[in-house]
Image: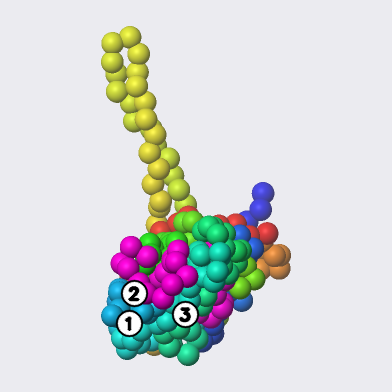
């Protein structure tokens, strides 16, 4: 029977920070990954996610001049930077001759300026990006705030009915679609695939700053218990049979750490922080368990024994096994 005599427990003792940078599309326009396999959640080191898109403002409305729209001031995530843009206007392109239908995308370009990108004329509208009669593909570092759809080749005032601003179709917001953060994979996943509305065609860019954990050994440790899910069953006796139901509970992880003075120890300095922990059942083999949770410490200072801390790991997910 194997024992954990040669086990090793490590904790997140430091972090390596990465400045705001573009995440990589995994190919499905849904999951975007970083160069780090783990993201820290320690206070001050948690990731900051900034998908390109509108934060506030940028309502597009009619204008008194022909073939022009008014653009309200607003703020947006623009290539990793929260950017404010003053109110302004943009010119709309119309079709020519028999190609009466044209879609103009109103955008904020990479310089933070209001601009317009004209689509290709046609005799009818299309919802396919980059095709005749369809919305144009816009630059990968630009953000679409509206579309203007005209059906006349004659100059004229743009009507409100010709301005389209549906989020996710004509308008890119930073908070749409929602996403989840995977700290154990160094990535985010959108609930729906992002539209391929940019040159490529490809999705809008997603940026993040994050920190990867740097591990150190808990030099004197024992009795590691990983956070794991336990299951229970309850039942109700009814006429002729029994009704049962099951429930799951995520248990708290724990370990014992033997300390130097119980005050200046590096592990003690990180109490109440959310940290990564890595446990090797055999320090000379590769398999390990990985978990992230809030470190709790309860110290004892016996007169005739070593100073020690009963440590808890309050996790939101069960520990994972890595081979």
Residue at point 63%, 56% (across, down): 3
Which quarter of the image is occupied by the C terminus? bottom right
Residue nearest the viewer, comparing 205 with 149: 149
Residue at point 36%, 79% (across, down): 66
Task: State the SS at label 2.
Answer: loop
Residue for badge 1: 65
Q: Please state the horizontal and vertical placement of residue 28, each as a whole percent of the image.
A: 61, 60
Residue nearest the viewer, comparing 76 with 164: 164
Badge 1 crowding class, 10 Å Cα cut-off, few under 14, some 14 to 19, many 20 or more, is: few
Judge depth for marks 1 and 3 and give the one in front: 1
Spot the residue most to the right.
285
Q: Are marks 2 and 1 in contact (CB under 8 Å)?
A: yes
Q: Which one is earlier in the sequence, the residue at label 3 or at label 2?
A: 3
Residue for badge 2: 157
- Assess whether residue 138 is covered by the magenta stretch: yes
Residues shaded magenta: 133-162
Q: In whole angstroms, how far apart are the C-alphas of marks 2 and 1?
A: 6 Å
Task: State the SS at label 1.
Answer: loop
Res. 106 visible in picture = no
Residue nearest the viewer, comparing 239 with 188: 188
Q: Please state the horizontal and vertical placement of residue 132, each as a whole percent of the image.
A: 60, 64
Q: Please state the horizontal and vertical placement of residue 236, each as a whole percent of the image.
A: 29, 23
Q: Which of the 4 quarters of the picture holds residue 92?
A: bottom left
Q: Which of the 4 quarters of the picture holds residue 133?
A: bottom right
Residue at point 51%, 58% (across, down): 125
Residue for badge 3: 116
């Amino acid at each position: 029977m194997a024992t954990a005599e040669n086990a090793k427990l490590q904790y997140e003792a430091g972090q390596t920070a990465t400045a705001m940078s573009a995440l990589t599309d995994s190919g499905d326009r849904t999951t975007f990954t970083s160069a780090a396999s783990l993201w820290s959640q320690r206070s001050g080191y948690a990731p900051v996610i900034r998908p390109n898109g509108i934060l506030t403002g940028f309502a597009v409305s009619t204008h008194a001049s022909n073939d022009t729209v008014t653009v309200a001031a607003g703020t947006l995530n623009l290539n990793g930077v929260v950017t404010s843009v003053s109110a302004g206007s943009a010119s709309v392109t119309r079709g020519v001759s028999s190609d009466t239908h044209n879609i103009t995308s109103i955008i904020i370009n990479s310089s933070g300026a209001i601009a317009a990108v004209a689509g290709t004329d046609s005799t009818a509208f299309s919802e396919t990006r980059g095709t005749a009669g369809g919305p144009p593909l816009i630059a990968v570092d630009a953000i679409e705030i509206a579309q203007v759809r005209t059906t006349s080749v004659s100059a004229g005032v743009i009507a409100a009915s010709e301005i389209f601003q549906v989020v996710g179709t004509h308008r890119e917001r930073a908070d749409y679609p929602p996403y989840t953060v995977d700290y154990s994979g160094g990535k985010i996943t959108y609930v729906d695939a992002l539209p391929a509305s940019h040159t490529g065609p490809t999705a809008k860019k997603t940026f993040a700053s994050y920190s990867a954990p740097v591990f150190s050994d808990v030099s004197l440790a024992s009795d590691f218990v990983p956070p794991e899910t336990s299951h229970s069953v309850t039942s109700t006796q009814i006429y002729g049979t029994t009704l049962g139901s099951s429930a799951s509970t995520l248990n708290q992880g724990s370990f014992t750490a033997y300390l130097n003075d119980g005050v200046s120890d590096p592990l003690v300095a990180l109490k109440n922080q959310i940290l990564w922990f890595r446990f090797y059942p055999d320090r000379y083999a590769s398999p390990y368990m990985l978990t992230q949770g809030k470190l709790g410490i309860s110290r004892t200072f016996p007169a005739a024994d070593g100073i020690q801390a009963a440590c808890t790991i309050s996790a939101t997910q069960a520990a994972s096994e890595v081979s």
